[in-house]
Amino acid sequence: EEKELLDNVCRARKKGKLTANIVAALDEWGRRTDFLRLYQAVQVGLRLQELGIRHVHAHFAGMAARTAFWIHRFFPVTFSFTAHANDVFVPRPFEIGLDKLVDAARVIVTETDYAAQFLREQFPKRANIVHRIYNGLNLAEFGQADFSSTPPLMVAVGRLIAKKGFANLISACGLLVQSGKAFQCEIIGEGLLENEFRAQIEKLNLQDRVTLSGAKPQRELRQRLATANVFVLPSVVDAQGGMDNLPTVIMEAMAAGLPVISTDVGGISEMVVQNETGFLVRPGDAAELTGAIEKVIDDRQLAQRLGQAGYERARELFSIEKNARELFALINIGSGD
């Protein structure tokens, strides 16, 4: 793919399709880090010109946004981007960094009020172009939890990395066993800490209670949510400052009508309303997490009430049709369309 990209741009250059500033930028950049973003910008930008497209939107303030930055530099095309979590809170030190993206973008979208405020404080001169639009889901794709699993099933979903807080969930499961609670816990996902988590499960003798089931396709994931009694994501801030912002898996659990237990990290409290759609506990506090889980698995009526309220909140905030319309309208402001 890289060779094909370079060959395509080289042919366009030989045919005289590239302006002098594009040629100069390619020559100056050479093979420096991230040089492929320039070549991608040229290839995509030429196609955008053919189609008469004057604006592009990128998801994540990463490779896509950096490519959009160069498209804007090379062609009469404006750009916007949606910033998510670590691309905002722990941006990587690329030459075209978050500061340059913010300066050049026409519109910046992020998925929570928390992240929007963070960006406005970081870049006060561009605060007026930062907007919050929640991510959207097709709610019709999700079946509703029936809370029939016996013993109660808690499901957690995410990469097996530190910021997801799964070490605390496993510790909480150990405390639940000590309290004599019947339950099953399934952690869906894969990642660098899998061996560490398996060792923790074995050390606490939880092999019959806690399952690491690996990554699953979306259809199977939705089926697992529908069979669960509660969804748990005990997010923490990792050693590098990385954190969740608006975890899609929480949105999906709410869409399935599940009560959600999580922590007040990033924008999670904008999703999970304490005592209304679930419970928020202190990050890293396994004992408090255990207490919240006990409340839900001990009281099916409470679980159903929280889950129904969560579904209604998901329908209000995370409808893909509604949120797509908001994004479309925002991008079109001042575009002349």
Image: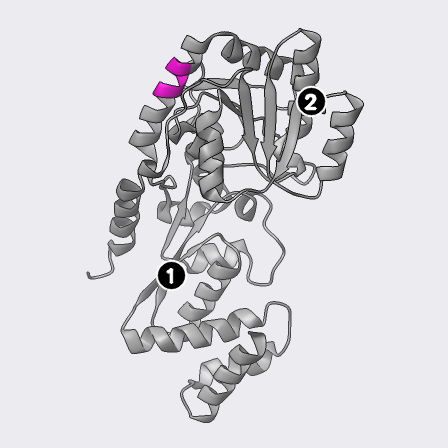
Q: Residue at horizontal 36%, vertical 57%? A: 106
User: Of discs 1 and 2, which sits in the foreground?
Assistant: 2
- Numbered mark located on residue 327 in the image: none
The overriding secondary structure of the stretch rendered in magenta is: helix
- Farthest residue to the bottom: give it: 15
Give the number of callouts: 2
Q: Secondary structure at mark 2?
A: loop
Q: Which residues make up the magenta segment? A: 304-308
Q: Secondary structure at mark 1?
A: strand
Q: Point out residue 218 in the picture as x, y percentages from the top left corner.
A: 47, 43
In the image, what residue type sits under mark 2?
A: Asp
Residue under label 2: 208
Relative to 207, say whether 115 is above or below. Answer: below
Relative to 78, say whether 49 is above or below. Answer: below
The quadrant the N terminus occupies is bottom right
Q: Residue at horizontal 58%, vertical 42%? A: 215
Q: Residues within 10 Å of mark 1 (few under 14, many from 20)?
A: many
Label 1 vs label 2: CA separation?
51 Å
The quadrant the C terminus occupies is bottom left
Q: Point out residue 132 in the picture as x, y percentages from the top left corner.
A: 37, 40
Q: Point out residue 310 in the picture as x, y percentages from the top left corner.
A: 38, 23
Residue 262 on the magenta span: no
Q: Residues within 10 Å of mark 2 (few under 14, many from 20)?
A: few
**In the depicted view, which residue is nearer to us: 18 or 315?**
315
Dot 1 or dot 2: first in sequence order is 1
In the image, what residue type sits under mark 1?
A: Phe
Relative to 94, say whether 117 is above or below. Answer: above
Q: Residue at horizontal 53%, vertical 16%? A: 150
Residue under label 1: 79
Task: Examine the rendering and report whether any part of residue 246 can be seen.
Answer: no
Q: Quadrant of residue 258?
A: top left
